[in-house]
Image: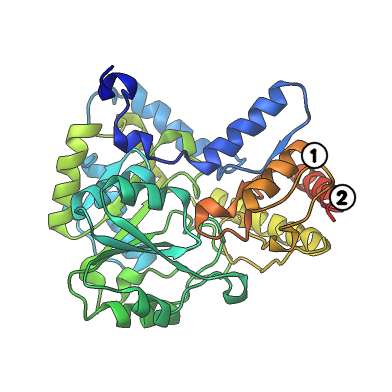
């Protein structure tokens, strides 16, 4: 038997880790399918519906015949709307020829990594980081270099840490603000300090993932692309999933140096071509339309955040900070490592999450996949009733661990 017959899958797929968020969401669904009352706090998906005015714009686009292929980098009207949005909301000056629309921010990040990275290049990841960053970097043949910041640092890395991680092979830095999974938001001062470290290294590019921009409780979102010393090497990634509750529409975008935007469009042309036409028309409308539904959604997330923080703070061994954005709590639960209920032993955060799913019927995601093995991610994109019940169940379950 030949090796190809014995192992037909490519090394790329065989060595690729499964998305932890998707895995835990599926385990939650499987348990629920067996008749258990499971509360899943796994996925980063707003529990709100897409605002009606955006859905109406999509229906109108269908009626107007927007059902055909689109230009690979996106409809001109959407790219122009994104350009206006960048300038209006972020102080960023990206022309429409510097913008590429993709099938979600995830594809956007993959496009950039596959366009920039060669085998052996190093990519600095501010940890905790979104689970797919590391997998995408490895898929491009590069080496992830996590720079960790724990709950004591409010999950924000320092400029000194970034400086210490830079080598002659560093090609890219990736971070999100507001951050998935921690909800932390980088201030202008912190971003300027990091930019000052990166500025002398002209071969290092920066991906700033700003998909949670509109779910920001600080009152002001800041983009590192506004810092003059690095702005020509910043790729600003965003999308419509979180701020507009459009997860299933699969629309993301980036602003980038023109040479890189052209490269990403070339790459995307071989993978998926352009994103769906009527969705792009609705997205263009959304960027210039009433933002009241988005602000209402943000305010509700803030209210839920405070409820969940208060409840989790009452649980023995949970170290909880106060995230400034997104819709996640990322408690340090390392207190429970080495403990057991007499049957299940908790060695790490993955064990802890499996224990909660089996014993509390609450789905969460272990911090290992986010580069922070002492933590777990709890999404509070659920109703207040579900959140209160979920934390109550968690508290009951962990009281059995000795």
Q: Residue 202: where, in percent of width, then height? A: 18, 74
Mark 2 crowd level (few <14, some 14–19, many ≥20, 10 Å Cα): few
Quadrant of the image occupied by residue 31: top right
Q: Is residue 29 left or right of residue 275?
A: right
Q: Is residue 359 left or right of residue 79?
A: right
Give the residue at x 21% y 38%.
268
Residue linked to disc 1: 359
Q: Nearest the camera: 230 or 94?
A: 230
Q: CA distance from mark 1 to mark 2?
A: 10 Å
Count of numbered marks: 2
Residue 359 against residue 324 in the figure, above or below: above
* Mark with earlier residue (1, 2): 1
Q: How is the image coloured?
A: rainbow
Q: Residue 347: where, in percent of width, then height? A: 67, 53
Where's the N terminus, which quadrant?
top left
> Tag 1, which secondary structure?
helix
Q: Nearest the camera: 132 or 381?
A: 132
Residue linked to disc 2: 400
Answer yes or no: is residue 51 visible.
no
Residue 55 against residue 6 in the figure, above or below: below
Where's the C terminus, which quadrant?
bottom right
Q: Residue 374: where, in percent of width, then height? A: 62, 61
> Tag 2, which secondary structure?
loop
Quadrant of the image occupied by residue 37: top right
Q: Is residue 49 left or right of residue 268?
A: right
Mark 1 crowd level (few <14, some 14–19, many ≥20, 10 Å Cα): some
Q: Nearest the camera: 370 or 279?
A: 370
Give the residue at x 43% y 82%.
189
Q: Check contact, mark 1 vs mark 2: CB within 8 A.
A: yes
Q: Is residue 80 left or right of residue 283?
A: left
Q: Nearest the camera: 346 or 87?
A: 346
Q: Residue 213: where, in percent of width, then height? A: 47, 59
């Amino acid at each position: 038997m030949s090796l190809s017959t014995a192992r037909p899958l490519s090394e790329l797929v065989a060595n690729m880790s499964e998305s932890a968020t998707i895995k835990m969401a599926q385990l939650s669904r499987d348990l629920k399918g067996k008749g258990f009352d499971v509360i899943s706090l796994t996925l980063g998906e707003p529990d709100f519906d897409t605002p009606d005015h955006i859905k109406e714009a999509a229906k109108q686009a269908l009626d107007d015949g927007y059902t055909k292929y689109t230009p690979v980098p996106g409809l001109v009207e959407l790219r122009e709307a994104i350009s206006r949005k960048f300038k209006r909301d972020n102080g960023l000056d990206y022309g429409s020829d510097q913008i590429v629309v993709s099938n979600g921010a995830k594809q956007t990040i993959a496009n950039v990594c596959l366009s920039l990275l060669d085998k052996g290049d190093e990519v600095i990841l501010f940890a905790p980081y979104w689970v797919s960053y590391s997998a995408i970097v490895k898929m491009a043949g590069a080496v992830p270099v996590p720079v960790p910041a724990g709950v004591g640092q409010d999950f924000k890395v320092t400029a000194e840490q970034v400086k210490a991680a830079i080598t002659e092979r560093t090609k890219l830095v990736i971070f999100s603000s507001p951050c998935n999974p921690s909800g932390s938001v980088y201030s202008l001062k912190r971003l300027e300090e990091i930019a000052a470290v990166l500025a002398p290294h002209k071969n290092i590019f920066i991906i700033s993932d700003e998909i949670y921009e509109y779910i920001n409780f600080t009152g002001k979102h800041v983009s590192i692309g506004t810092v003059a010393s690095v702005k020509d090497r910043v790729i600003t990634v965003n999308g419509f999933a979180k701020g507009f509750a459009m997860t299933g529409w699969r629309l993301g975008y980036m602003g980038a140096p023109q040479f890189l935007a052209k490269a990403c469009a070339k790459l995307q042309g071989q993978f998926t071509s352009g994103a769906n036409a009527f969705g792009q028309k609705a997205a263009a409308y959304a960027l210039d339309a009433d933002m009241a539904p988005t602000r209402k959604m943000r305010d509700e997330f803030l209210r839920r955040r405070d409820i969940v923080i208060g409840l989790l703070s009452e649980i023995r061994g949970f170290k909880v900070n106060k995230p400034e954005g997104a819709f996640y709590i990322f408690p340090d639960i390392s207190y429970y490592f080495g403990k057991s209920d007499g049957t299940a032993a908790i060695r790490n955060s993955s064990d802890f999450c499996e224990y909660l799913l089996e014993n509390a019927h609450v789905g969460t995601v272990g911090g290992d996949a986010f580069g922070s093995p002492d933590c777990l991610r709890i999404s509070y994109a659920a109703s207040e009733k579900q959140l209160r019940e979920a934390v109550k169940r968690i508290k009951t379950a962990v009281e059995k661990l000795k």
